[in-house]
Amino acid sequence: MTKDVSNTGVEVKVRDHFHDDAARFDAIYAKEKGLIAGFIDNYWRGVVQKRLEMNVEKLEPLTGKKILDVGCGSGRFCFAFAERGAAKVIGVDFAKAMIDIANKLATEMGLSQQCEFRVGTFPDAIDESEGPFDACTGNGFFDYVEHPIPIIARMRELTKGKLILSFPKAIEWRVPLRRVRFWMKGTPLFLYREQQVKDILAGAGVNQYEFIHLDRDYLVVADV
Ligand SMILES: C[S@@+](CC[C@H](N)C(=O)[O-])C[C@H]1O[C@@H](n2cnc3c(N)ncnc32)[C@H](O)[C@@H]1O
């Protein structure tokens, strides 16, 4: 990909990683897969599906809601919200190949009216006038964010309702291998301890929340 000078060094590395890895990432959501891929996705990346189910559960009823999904990837969360009645879902992601997949899937699923996908960096990609949203979600996203406080503060400002945010645990059995994999690829990875997440939330002005241990993640469901 061509380099974008408006992104930081970390953002450029993360964006290029997910641009190149988009199809493989989306395959995690595939229903039919081979024995080995199925085993790896269940035991290694099972959290991805659990997060999706928990987001839906916490945001129900979704009917009529307007939702912003930050770091939407291939749009799987957006589709789940739209299929359950969300009126409008905006997904933003700076990896173009992810948004290409999201747009293709939206057409195939007949969800293009409700789902709008945008290539861009959050928060710049979302204008104040587009809010407020009933909910704003960021799943599998803070793993790749160097400075989470201003990002969460902006998500809070744009939302009148719920924030759902996942943070990968720093102390967890899969961490050493995950660190090595990302180090070998040269992709930044940020992991968190429980108190660190709570300090970040306080720094972003998020004070009322449910704190859930979900597999290898902490999942925060906040009222804002
Ligand atoms: C692991 S993927 C998760 C995708 C989706 N939320 C899911 O769980 O299926 C993380 C995504 O965040 C995107 N991302 C990271 N930082 C971003 C930023 N500041 N602005 C927009 N997208 C970002 C990456 O390009 C990547 O596609």
Image: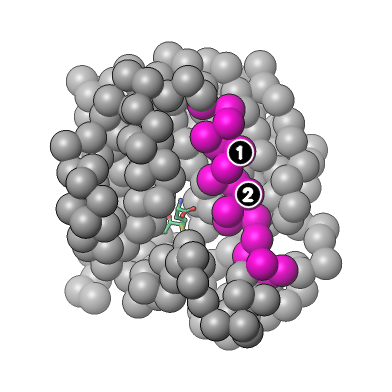
Q: Which residue is mark 1?
A: 54
Q: Position of residue 221 (x, y in %)?
A: 62, 28
Image: 199 above or below 11: above
* Secondary structure mostly taken by the magenta-highlighted segment of the chain: helix
| Amino acid under disc 1 | Met
Lateral position of residue 94 relative to residue 182, left or right: left
| Amino acid under disc 2 | Lys
Question: Which of the numbered marks, if any, corresponds to residue 50?
Answer: 2
Identify which residue, 184 or 33, lies in the foreground.
33
Residue displayed at 25% across by 51% down: 109
Report the magenta residues as a range.
42-59
| Crowding near the residue tagged with mark 2, few <14, some 14–19, many ≥20 C-alpha atoms within 10 Å | few
| Residue 25 at least partly seen | no
Residue 8 highlighted magenta (yes or no): no
Instruction: Indicate which quadrant contains ligand 1.
Output: bottom left
Task: Determine the image quadrant of residue 23.
Answer: bottom left
Position of the N terminus by quadrant: bottom left
Q: Do tag 2 and tag 1 residues touch (Cβ < 8 Å)? A: yes
